Image (tube, grey):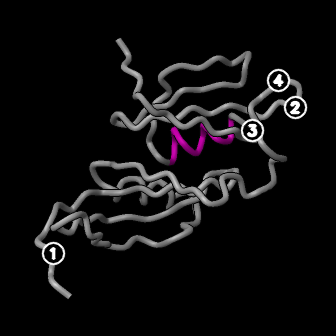
Amino acid sequence: MFIRNPMVPELIVTTLSASLDFWVHKLGFTLAYQRVEEGFAYLDLNGAQIMLEQYDPNAGQWLTASLDRPFGRGINLQIDVPVVAPILQRLARVDWPLFKDVEQAWYRAGDVEAGQRQFIVQDPDGYLIRLVERLGERPLVPA
């Protein structure tokens, strides 16, 4: 039985086939299920889930404003992955540009710092996707 997360973002996309190519073939998501007749797909990557819905001006989609590129301005979707290297290799093979190069970042989280290796890429519609490999925690160094 497929388990759906309590919170799953749904992105309106211009062309579902182009988005599926990016999310599945370049980032490594699997297609949990699809409603081709509705231009809809539900994707999963190790429990990180996302829904994609192709824009249809006659479908009554929940839009608060016109869709102007890049979509999703002001948001980035952080997705934990076991290792970022295979994703970077797939992106490099097809010359997919990175929005922000790979970096090691440490963020204060209470009384520790949480580390992650991360990079940001844009999907075909301009949504920012931040892929994160967890590096663990370390004691917080006083300023």
Looking at the image, the residue that sits furthest to the right is 58
Q: Main secondary structure of the magenta part?
A: helix
Circle 2 is placed at which residue position? 57
Q: Of helix, strand and loop, which one carries label 1?
A: loop
Horizontal relation, residue 53 to residue 128: left or right = right
Q: Earlier in the sequence, mark 4 or mark 3?
A: 3
Q: Residue at x 34, y 49 (%)?
A: 80
Circle 4 is placed at which residue position? 59
Alpha-carbon distance for marks 3 and 2? 13 Å
Q: Quadrant of residue 105?
A: bottom left
Q: Earlier in the sequence, mark 2 or mark 1?
A: 2
Horizontal relation, residue 50 to residue 111: left or right = right
| Quadrant of the frame with the C terminus | bottom left
| Residue 45: % across, % down | 39, 37
Q: Earlier in the sequence, mark 3 or mark 1?
A: 3
Q: Earlier in the sequence, mark 3 or mark 2?
A: 3
Q: Of helix, strand and loop, which one carries label 2?
A: loop
Q: Of helix, strand and loop, which one carries label 4?
A: loop
Circle 1 is placed at which residue position? 140
Circle 3 is placed at which residue position? 15
